[in-house]
Amino acid sequence: MRHASRAGTATLAIDPIGVGESSKPPGWQVSATTAASTLHQVITAARNGRLGHRWDKIVLVGHSFGSLTAMQEVGTYHDVDGLLVSGASHAPGPGGILQIQTSVRPALHDPRTARSVPAGDYTYLSVPGARARAFYAPRDSDPAVVAADEASRVAGTIGVLATIPVFIPTTFEIDVPVLVANGRADNVFCAQGGGGSLTDCTDARTLYRSERPFFPEADLSTYVLPAAGHSMNLALNNQEFFERAQRWASAI
């Protein structure tokens, strides 16, 4: 957000439903579909001026789960001018996904998040230390940043985790410019990370070949951040990604 603001771009950071400062219905009620629907409501409000200004150009940006939700939203509602997908691909590795799935526990069992979720809610949280193992490439990470990420962890919703695959058919309907960006060492969504993914993130060209079949109607661009892991926004060389993303969005 700071990078985009310095470039003169207005930004709005959105906590998905059930997460952070957003409303927290029972976790089992929050599916990928409802997450996309609530996101559509926010975009509609930005379009019609209910957020204080009427925005004519909107580029939706997602990361990881947020990217999957963003793809479903755009493919379903067709209400934005561009879509930036980071930290995601259509062929995640079973090893990386398993590492995440085996590192979750009820948020009520964690003293850091127990007070932030409704009693009896089916929310989940990564086991402490899981982020460093699953989301960061050691050579491209600051240990202090990893520690800060761990210390600020929040709960998510089990319904979204259970309904992730529903986003896939909607990407075939996306008809706006799309930028897919991944860290080369992402062990969840890229083959180079070692998690068993079929997505080739060697460079932008190989990533394009992997993702092109899923975006037949979109003007697709791709980008690979060298050495970065899944949390490419927090990598040491993240400014390279931010600059590429800003140039792409400005050209829409």
Image: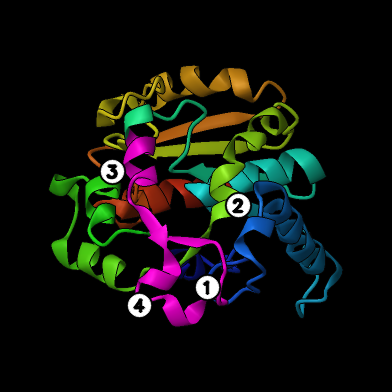
Secondary structure type for disc 2: helix
**Do the residues bearing badges 4 and 1 touch, measured as CB atoms within 8 Å?**
no
At horizontal 37% and vertical 68% (from top left) the residue drawn is: 153
Earlier in the chain: of badge 4 and badge 3, it is 4
**Label placed on residue 112:** 4
Measured Cα–Cα span from mark 2 to mark 3: 26 Å
**Label placed on residue 52:** none
Image check: 171 left or right of 193?
Answer: right
Amino acid at the residue labelled 2: Gly
Crowd tier of the residue under label 4, counting other residues whose Cα lies within 10 Å: few below 14, some 14–19, many 20 or above? some
Residue 94: quadrant of the picture: top left
Earlier in the chain: of badge 2 and badge 1, it is 1
At horizontal 57% and vertical 68% (from top left) the residue drawn is: 121
Measured Cα–Cα span from mark 4 to mark 1: 13 Å
Whether 116 is among the magenta residues is: yes
Earlier in the chain: of badge 4 and badge 2, it is 4
Crowd tier of the residue under label 1, counting other residues whose Cα lies within 10 Å: few below 14, some 14–19, many 20 or above? some
Q: Is residue 188 visible?
A: no
Question: Where are the magenta residues, as a range?
Answer: 96-124
**Label placed on residue 229:** 3
Of badges 4 and 3, the one in the foreground is 4
Secondary structure type for disc 4: loop
Q: Which residue is mark 2?
A: 159
Amino acid at the residue labelled 3: Gly
Q: Position of residue 21 (x, y in %)?
A: 57, 77
At horizontal 48% and vertical 17% (from top left) the residue drawn is: 209
